[in-house]
Image (cartoon, rainbow, N blue to C red):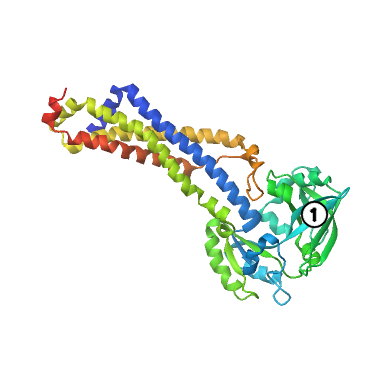
Amino acid sequence: MAYLTKMAWRNLGRHRGRTMLSLIAIIMGVFVVVIAKGLIDGIVDTFITYNINLNSGHVRIIQPEYKLKEQTLSLGYTVGDEDTPYHSIVKDIRNIPDVKVATGRIRFGMLLVAGDHVQETVLGIGTDFDEEERITHLSRFLEGSERGTLPRAGQREILLGDALMDKLGVGVGDKVNAVFSTSFGSLGIATFRVVGQMSSGLKFLDESLAYIPLDTAMHLLDMDDSVTEIVVFGETLSKSDAIKAQIEPVVNTLPGKPVVVPWDEYSELISLMSKAKAIYAVIYILIVILASFVVFNTLLMVVSERTREIGMLAALGLSPQSIRRLFLIEGTIMALAGSFLGALLGGVFNLWFGSRGLDISKMTENLGGEFLLTPRIYPTTNVSTLVFSFVLGVVVTIVAVYIPARHAGKLKPTEALRSV
């Protein structure tokens, strides 16, 4: 094997231009895969993370009927009642070993009115800010003392996005009036003081949401001891199935038989995005296959040009298997070198690109609020991406060079020596 490796290394140096062309093709193929995978993973991971934190949790506990009427923001199907209050349900769930955070939310429609009868319809969310902070870290969107703080429990305080505040013409410390429908269908009116101004870059968060304390929402909406949903988080997303299995026995004993909905069933869009990585993996393979055609054609040409040499080696006693192995080693050397350099350059580029981000504000302006993408996307750079791209480059290239190598091994010495 050692002498075959030496011969393969010497042969690669005989036609340096051709070898360099093959190397560049592999490098560029793997380089593009690293960049594309880093960018796609960055977009998908950002979208899924925001959806999980702001909407679905790792799992979500709701009434079966609520999912059907969720778009109407119905308050008629709640989790918890006077006999089985929300707080006792959450306490039981928090005692489950794999559960990190469990908290309730109330989603309801709300009309905000400010100034000279300026009004905006928003999605109101009643939440426990102490628990919410462990999940969504809303305080990070309040950087700077002028942006205020999170609302306090029991107070009529409200947290709004900067875009929404601009529409309403209010600032931190101002008051807004809210009009809403209670769980009994009656009209409710309340005045809130704006204590925080969010600036997240998310259209959904900055333009369409209004956060208030959970206990305040329960009181105003006549929903004492109940919420529209309970979101549950484990240590990692991979534990969502285990959490679901552990929660279901607790939930099955509750009034109305609530259901436990995993994060990937929250909507069709999030389900599709969660499968995007697998779909794009096919595209990555196609990119490397296209690059490997250069190596395939080059090695096929080399076999054709070295036919007499192959015949001579065979006549000197080199077996067909050894001849085939010789060309496979040549291809493997190029595959390893090209894939390594491509992965290295792609990783360096993604590190540089990831520190600056890609501005996609023009695209996000035209997207609906359900697309939770920030105006700037940061490609991911991790070892798994580099390893995936390196292995993909090596495997596809070796497969591509097998046909020319096999053809070289099949050449008969007498026919090879007769060739011009």
What's under tag 1, amino acid-wise? Answer: Ile
Q: Is residue 173 left or right of residue 398?
A: right
388 on left or right of 91: left
What percent of the width, then of the height, locates residue 383? 48, 42
Q: Quadrant of the C terminus?
A: top left
Kind of element beneath mark 1: strand
From this viewpoint, which residue is outermost toward the right?
A: 116
All told, the count of numbered labels is 1
Quadrant the N terminus occupies: top left
Q: Say above or below: 151 vs 84.
A: above
Q: Residue at x 83, y 44 (%)?
A: 169
For residue 250, side relative to residue 218 (left or right): left
Residue at figure coordinates x 78%, y 66% from the top left = 182
Quickly name the residue at label 1. 158
Farthest bottom residue in view: 83
Q: Where is residue 65 drawn, in percent x and y?
A: 64, 68
In the figure, 310 relative to 186: above or below? above
Q: Nearer the viewer, residue 370 or 326?
A: 370
Along the line of sight, the residue nearer the viewer: 410 or 8: 410
Q: Quadrant of residue 11?
A: top left
Q: Is residue 96 at all visible to an observer of this figure? A: no
**Mark 1, residues whose alpha carbon is within 10 Å: few (<14), some, or many (≥20)?**
many
Above or below, 407 against 16 in this view is below
Residue 400 place in picture, x, y as percent:
32, 37
- The residue shown at (63%, 45%) is 373
Residue 53 at least partly seen: yes
